[in-house]
Image (spheres, coloured by chain):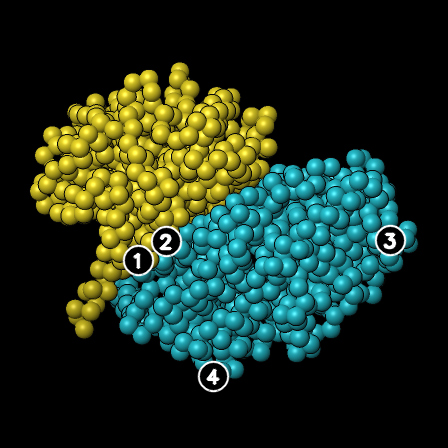
Chain colours: A yellow, B cyan
Amino acid sequence: MHLLLLWAVAGLLRSTLACTAPEAVDVAIVGGGLAGLSAAVQLAAANKSVMVIEARDRVGGRVLNVELPNGGIIEAGAEFIGPTQDRVISLAAELGLGTFATYNTGENVLWHNGTRLTYSTAGPDVAPPIDTLSLIQLATALAELNSMALEINASAPWTHPRAVEWDSMTFGSWLDNATPLQSARFLFDVATTSIFAAEPRDLSLLYTLAYIAAAGNETTPGTFERLTATAGGAQDRRVTGGTQLLAVRLAERLGMEHISLSTPVRHIKRIDEGYKVTADGLALRAKQVVIAMSPPLAARIDYEPILPAIRDQLTQRLPMGSMGKAVALYDTPFWRDDGLNGQAASDTGIVRSTFDSSPEDGSYGAMLGFIAADQMRKFDAKSEDEIKAEVVKDFVNYFGPKAASPTSWVIQRWDNEKFSRGGPVAFAPPGVLTQHGPALQQGFEGIHFAGTESAPYWIGYMDGAIRSGERVAKEVLETS
Amino acid sequence: MHLLLLWAVAGLLRSTLACTAPEAVDVAIVGGGLAGLSAAVQLAAANKSVMVIEARDRVGGRVLNVELPNGGIIEAGAEFIGPTQDRVISLAAELGLGTFATYNTGENVLWHNGTRLTYSTAGPDVAPPIDTLSLIQLATALAELNSMALEINASAPWTHPRAVEWDSMTFGSWLDNATPLQSARFLFDVATTSIFAAEPRDLSLLYTLAYIAAAGNETTPGTFERLTATAGGAQDRRVTGGTQLLAVRLAERLGMEHISLSTPVRHIKRIDEGYKVTADGLALRAKQVVIAMSPPLAARIDYEPILPAIRDQLTQRLPMGSMGKAVALYDTPFWRDDGLNGQAASDTGIVRSTFDSSPEDGSYGAMLGFIAADQMRKFDAKSEDEIKAEVVKDFVNYFGPKAASPTSWVIQRWDNEKFSRGGPVAFAPPGVLTQHGPALQQGFEGIHFAGTESAPYWIGYMDGAIRSGERVAKEVLETS
């Protein structure tokens, strides 16, 4: 009985401490991905006390290194960086992280109508091997998309005079009209699913244009090609040691004492001096709160008082894409010897887009296949073995029989991750941006919103996450 | 100190009771709306022990009576019932509730291009007063919609051969093509916003067709007109005493000891014998669980283990419409004396669709204006006075100067309701039904899904909610 009493007293004291006098900080930051960590570092540098509250047992969010038995790493989440992604490039440099060019030597593979073709993307002749009429449709559609995107303010696409018109149709409907030839259309389908992990039918045309517009910076307009390209595009370079080091080193810079792991936030309640933030096993008071999460997961926190309708309904309207990465490991990057750069585009199969994810020194081979949108949904509930069997069929189609025998695998299904439930980004179906778009960035009475979805440039990318964190830090400082 | 110890021991005992030996039932039903209550009554009748766990301090969900100082009531949520809504009709009879015809005598008002016209909907000449070419477009488009809907299985629209095609475009894109004349189009816009509280641009064409197909029953195919019509349609009749009595009497039949109010469910965890359901101030064990909530709010519960990706991503992809009702009360239903039935359709204003919501005896006047979709979103953050000022302008346009002086108001904004965050129904943008639709109804390891969104007929209506509750009860009994 004495022991019970002691336990009870200890429990009482603990709960008293937790419930009535929680730790106080200037800013609570919900989410320890690149957005939250970037905000935290900026705020700490401005002498604000911060606490980053993360649901997972690690930092990084949608950025994740998987360690291999051979000592290497595979990036199971965001992997590539490229020109105009100024903030992630300078952050890598600040944090002492090297970068290297994504392997891009040799020919691309095109798998189309059951036939394998290879073609070079070097030099002036960069066209994929499809018929001339389809090529013309492809080029015309690309030019038109880029031209529309050029007029768009990526931070406020709803201000464009034709915003409602463009937000009233799917990107798929636009493509139905612009690229009726299947040989042109399928290349857009591959590109769309690889970029958004959503089908063209899922996306608002306006959102697609805004995403293209965001694939640049203050001085360089975004283009569709910058999203799809390896050299000179979003897949241009990689980070030595893996992209999660960006998050890990940011966390170290901040100090792990300012980060609480394995503490999913459940409740954010207005109190006199700001907010009380309650997570599993943690409660603290904060003058201001930063929500650095994807909108659909941010909706799962209980806010008291409730958030404005424009924000709540936004979070109901931006779903995560359906996304996985399958990486097959081989003793060598054998495709290089066959004159291939490891990049394939396909109109069939579970994997419709691939990249060479081998380490910088090429000491072993890593073939990355994106499993996206409809393909991922088909396999969300299947076993890893079933996925591997399908992926390997595709890899053999694209890279020959040597692809049949990987030594090991990394399979990452973001749809099945509790604290992601999809990836790489929450996208907008028609009607959302024009009505609810402003609530992506707009704070509300001391609650501020970050996350790559709310970025001014490179929405959906690590660069956008960092930009959003820096924007929100500025916002917090201006209002505190 | 003794007192502290006593408290501590009491707290320990309480938490021990709550955490390790919660009450046990056969079925926990999350949500005390018509779906949850219907399921509960059926299950109790089959000798299952049940507990309905409701977040609000009342039953009824999206069905709500507001009592007036004069003793009358206004239905702030679902209000009308009509032919083929067999289950709500027979439930009303079973529960001893009378019904009466919605007031429908006299002419309709059409407010179009700033001009007011009136027209009769009685007799063979039911056409609205628009130009002949527009009328032809309207009739042709209606016929085509009904013809497509006729081919659709409302419970499984994704099985139609053209499902992907129809799910790849918005209803707005389809209308752009079918009704280029504004005088035809605006009538579809008014109808769409009144039915869905969403704009045509928000909706998948396939979803729209499924909703039309669901506006019927096993023997009578659904039509668009049955959704929009008063006499003979979804607005045909009303329930004496108000529709919330359906929920209240169901709850009484079940027994209030089987209903827990003001207990929002936060966590549903798999345990050996089923699930542990934890709400604010309540925990219980259940062999099976019924989630009788709208999908976006069901997503805000923490499930352990996580639900399959197809279900979780469905809940990210079905947002609530944006919906309010403004009811102006007058000493008399004065429009009746002017030969008007109180029904207006308009191409401008905050209110674009009205109904006479006066009591059966016409002892006072109640003019109902729907505030829907874009119009509701404009006013979600405004004051009630600002809304009243706008509504009254519209009512004066439609019904003359006597409308300028209501004696009182009922304003209900579902978007701002914590446990609704929109209304009347969660709708599907393009791409959702074909990929995630099966997860509307499909249970998962003892967790079952009800709610009007998962109904086989009358999706979005009280009838659909009841049908979904009865379906899920059957499912539970079959698997227990």
- Label 3 CA crowd tier, 10 Å (few <14, some 14–19, many 20+): few
Element type where label 3 sits in the image: loop
Task: Name which residue lies at 51% across and 28% down.
Answer: A157
Task: Name which residue lies at 34% across and 32% down.
Answer: A461
Asked if labels 1 and 2 touch by Cβ distance under 8 angstroms, the answer is: yes
Chain under disc 2: A
Residue that numbered label 2 is attached to: A378
Element type where label 1 sits in the image: loop
**B375 or B171: nearer the viewer:** B171
Distance from disc 3 to disc 4, alpha carbons, whole Å, reads 54 Å
Q: In which quarter of the image is the N terminus of chain A?
A: bottom left
**Disc marking residue A136:** none
- Label 2 CA crowd tier, 10 Å (few <14, some 14–19, many 20+): some
Of circles 4 and 2, which is in front?
2
- Label 1 CA crowd tier, 10 Å (few <14, some 14–19, many 20+): few
Residue that numbered label 1 is attached to: A382
* Mark 4: amino acid: Asn
* Mark 1: amino acid: Lys
Residue that numbered label 4 is attached to: B47
Where is residue A472 shown, x and y percent of the image? 38, 30
Chain under disc 3: B
Element type where label 2 sits in the image: helix
Residue that numbered label 3 is attached to: B125
Distance from disc 4 to disc 2, alpha carbons, whole Å, reads 39 Å
